[in-house]
Image: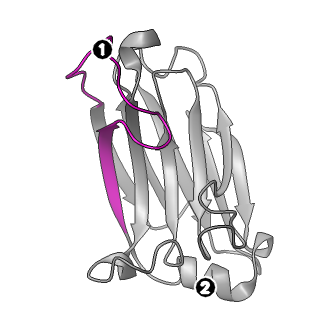
Amino acid sequence: MAVEARIQMPNVTGTAAQGYWPAFWMLGAPFRGNYTNWPSVGEMDIMENVNGVNTVWATLHCGTSPGGPCNVPTGLGGSTTCPGAPCQSAFHVYRIEWDRRGASEQLRWSVDGVVYHIVNQGDVDATTWANATGHGFFIILNVAIGGSWPGRPSGLTKSGIPMLVDYVSVYKSI
C-alpha cells in the first residue's frame, strides 16, 4: 500500500514562520472514540515541517509513552531536505509505502521519489508492530500554529499562509 500527496508547504520562512507546523500524517483507526490508546495504535507522520525550514521529517510512533520501543515522543524518525526547490517554495510529492510482500513488513518514506527513511518490522517487537499496524488508518492534513515542537509564534510570525494540496492518493499495491 502507498499513501502520497503533492503538497506545497506554507510559503513562509525565517522569523515570519516561527510556530508553523504543517503535517500530512495517518493515525490508527482504533484511536477514534478512545483517545487514550496513543501511541500504541500507531501514528505514521508522512511529512512534518516546523518553522519554515527546508527539512521534512518522517516518523513512526508506536508502543508506549514515554519511551517504549518507538522512543515516544521522538518516535522512529528520519529527515531530509526537499530535493530541487525548497519545501516552502514548490510542490513536492510526500509518500509512505507500506510493503507487506515479504516475510518482514517495511515502511518507506520518500520525497519526490527519493527514499530517505525506512522502518522495518523487526525494529520493534511483534506485538508492538501488530498493535501499530494491524488495522486501518485515517489520513490527516493540517497546519498547526505553535506547539511543543515548533514553539510559540512570535510577534513577527506572519499569519494565514496556507499549505497547498494538489492531490492525495491511496494505492492498494506498490
Residue 17: % across, % down? 39, 18
Give the farthest residue toward the bottom.
127
Give the farthest residue toward the left.
160
Residue 104: % across, % down? 76, 77
**Label 1 sits on what residue type?**
Gly
Secondary structure beneath label 1? loop
Residue 130: assigned label: 2
Residue toward you, 93 or 59: 59
Going by the image, does 12 lie left or right of 165? right
Residue toward you, 38 or 86: 38
Mark 1, residue position: 155
Going by the image, does 127 lie left or right of 173? right
Residue 125: % across, % down? 76, 82
Q: Main secondary structure of the magenta part?
A: loop
Name which of mark 1 and mark 2 comes first in the sequence.
2
- Residue at 35%, 16% in the rendered image: 11
Secondary structure beneath label 2? helix
As displayed, is residue 128 above or below residue 66? below
As displayed, is residue 140 above or below residue 122? above
Q: Give the extent of the magenta segment.
A: 138-163
- Residue at 61%, 22% in the rendered image: 83
Q: CA distance from mark 1 to mark 2?
A: 45 Å
